[in-house]
Image (cartoon, rainbow, N blue to C red):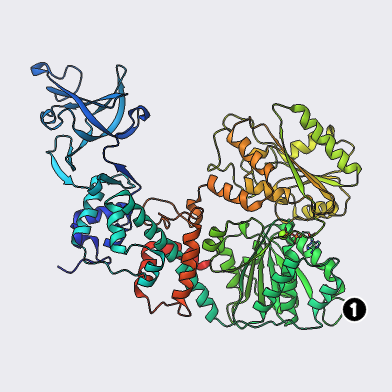
Amino acid sequence: MDKITLSSPLKDAIGGRTAAKLADKLELATVGDLLRYYPRKYDQRGKLTDLASLIVGERATVWAKVIKVTERDLGRGGGRNGRGGGVKHITNVLIGDSHRELTCTFFNQYHWSKLLKPGTDAMFSGKVTKFRDTLQISSPSVAIVSDGRQAEGDGAASLDVIEQFPGGVIPVYPLVEGITQTLVQHSVRAVLDVIEQIPDPVPDVLLARHGYVDLQTALGDIHRPRTEQYLEAARERLRYDEALSVQLVLARRRADARNFPAEPCPRIPGGLLDAFDANLPFALTTGQQEVGDTISTDLATIHPMNRLLQGEVGSGKTVVALRAMLQVIDSGRQAVMLAPTEVLASQHARSLRDVLGPLGRGGELGASQEATAITLLTGSLPAKARKQALLNIASGQAGIVVGTHALLSEGVFFSNLGLIVVDEQHRFGVEQRHALRSKHPEGNPPHVLVMTATPIPRTVAMTVFGDLDTSTLTELPRGRSPIGTTVVPAAERPAWVERAWQRIREEVAKGHQAYVVCPKIGDDDPSAMFEDGSTFDPDTDDGSQAGKRPPLAVNQVAAMLHDGPLQDLRLGILHGRLPPGEKDDVMTAFAAGELDVLVATTVIEVGVDVPNATMMVIMDAERFGMSQLHQLRGRVGRGHAPGICLLISEAPEGSVGKVRLDAVAATTDGFKLAEADLLLRREGNVLGTTQAGRSTALKQLSLLRDREVIERARADSIGLVGDDPEMKQWPGLADMVSLVIAAENQVYLDKG
Ligand code: ADP
Ligand code: MG
């Protein structure tokens, strides 16, 4: 037989039948796959299960001491109790601890009384039932643990000594139907027994620098830990492997990108950018200046820029992006800005036209020589206008193209695309970013700038956007006012809700404007709860929604306000199902101050910028995610007057919903909120699927807790990859990457 290595097929090490099972049920094909299939947790021998925690009706594995064994022979009269086949013999095994007891019952199995002497430690596994006030498990499977040996019998099967776990720490694997603990434990044991010395893919110098154990030790101890300390050392090492694998994928991608040529677009004096800067009504913040310089340099190089621009809501990312676009246009190329909603796309197009003035009217009568043209392309454009827009884009006449997903559709071609700006990335899949990049099939790939206002915890950014260079705008433009957020408990204090409407009237009296945000559009379409078509997020649903009234809808709330508390104010309605032209009209009217109050859905969540709006009232606030609330309230306080945000909610004091709202009210630090939100949503799916089996990319690594490891791995990966995306020097590492990160997730990262 061949030597057994990590890449050997499992059947060579553990036999064809078991291997087929593991392949079929857990997608484990090689020895390496199995050894990277880590225990979900560990049971400590001697630590008995807390019997008080058992739940009737559920399957449980109980680790307990045998107290007493009684046997009963029913003789020939057996089977009276309706058990077909005739019960002739019953063994009752009383197990327990000092607090609780439980009876395990075996039928017609004579050997248990000999094996389960009082004082024996054993694991009993089966469905917990209740019989005359005592808990019991009928016909459990049993694993005896004694003298450091664990033995197992299943039903009538004979006792079979299976395992000896050093240190008494017993691995418990994630299972699926048809796979037992013993099967996995056996297989791992068998594999560890026959495998050759495992070569370590991570260079010694790195292991030594970080004090990590070698791979052989780590894999041994993760499955069969000698002690808790060895287990912890193994975990640390394997956590690093995962972090390093992710970072290697990303580093390779960056190295790849660096090797692509790009059209350099250096800053050209006397062009549109200079004209724009000269007309800016405000001074750039230091951050905007610095990030702008960085981007300007990126654009001037002969490799494509791939940059993520993060910045709090209202930190002024748009200006930064615009300036980048203008620099590219000055080099005779096109720039495109992709926005997540039509409202936002039209707003961008409008404000671009405003700030560029005559410089943005290229092609129109009397426009100046260097002027460019701005073209808007959204899905709702009438056919004729769409055709014209496509023509402008393909001919290169449109220097700046602003649009939504529609830009990704068939039939959109650029003449000379130099820069892609993606605004508000969180609404945009990586897929789309990729699709847009490929809109430029011939010639060199364009530069890419991705902007996000949803603050992404640093480690997540490094992982999900790790192929991008990152810049952050930390300061808000001067004169920006703080937003005060207050939770209004509508159930306990209905009078406060009245006060909220009163407060809107006061703001309007001062010449300001307000938003009222509702979770739903109308009553007629229960599925359209949120603008993105999702209903309630089950991950954050704490059950407090159960049996509650349906969420408040824009149409009803607007009618109620119109007939009641705000009857003398000018109200507008905005949501995703309005005809596009109307959407635009409403937004324009609101921006122009022709409306006092905008009753809206989350369409206004991203990017909408009306500095005169000072107040926001969010209805049924507990129905929104924390980051979403933060985004929403970022729409106010954009001018000189302080912003007010009222979170109206019936979530009772002490409920998870209320706790979340209090957290939003307590801080304006988007990063903190994003971390909290991520924790609540479970971080597992950041990389994709979270099923049992191989596809779970990160088993040991936590993006939130393991920041240091991730940063270390990132630095190491840069050194390892260097300028060699193929990693020819480190074939073992390349193998590790494909073992640790399932192929589909690599693709995901790749497309990032
Ligand atoms: P976000 O980063 O959330 O996208 P925007 O780009 O929409 O923020 O900017 C918010 C508002 O701040 C806009 O009205 C913009 O004109 C204004 N703004 C941007 N930069 C500055 C600055 N340096 N000084 C004053 N106002 C600014
Ligand atoms: Mg923005």
Q: Which quadrant does the N terminus fall into?
A: bottom left
Q: Which quadrant does the C terminus fall into?
A: bottom right
Image side of residue 575 versus residue 276, left or right: left
Residue 415 figure quarter: bottom right
Residue highlighted by disc 1: 366
Identify which residue, 539 or 732, lies in the foreground. Answer: 732
Image side of residue 124 versus residue 75, left or right: right
Residue 572 figure quarter: top right
* Amino acid type, callout 1: Gly
x then y, percent, for residue 451: 66, 63
The residue that appears at 69% across and 82% down in the rendered structure is 265
x then y, percent, for residue 270: 82, 83
The answer to whether residue 363 shows anywhere in this view is no
The residue that appears at 62% across and 40% down in the rendered structure is 660
The residue that appears at 35% across and 71% down in the rendered structure is 204
Identify which residue, 238 or 374, lies in the foreground. Answer: 238
Q: Is residue 545 above or below residue 419?
A: above
Residue 523 figure quarter: top right
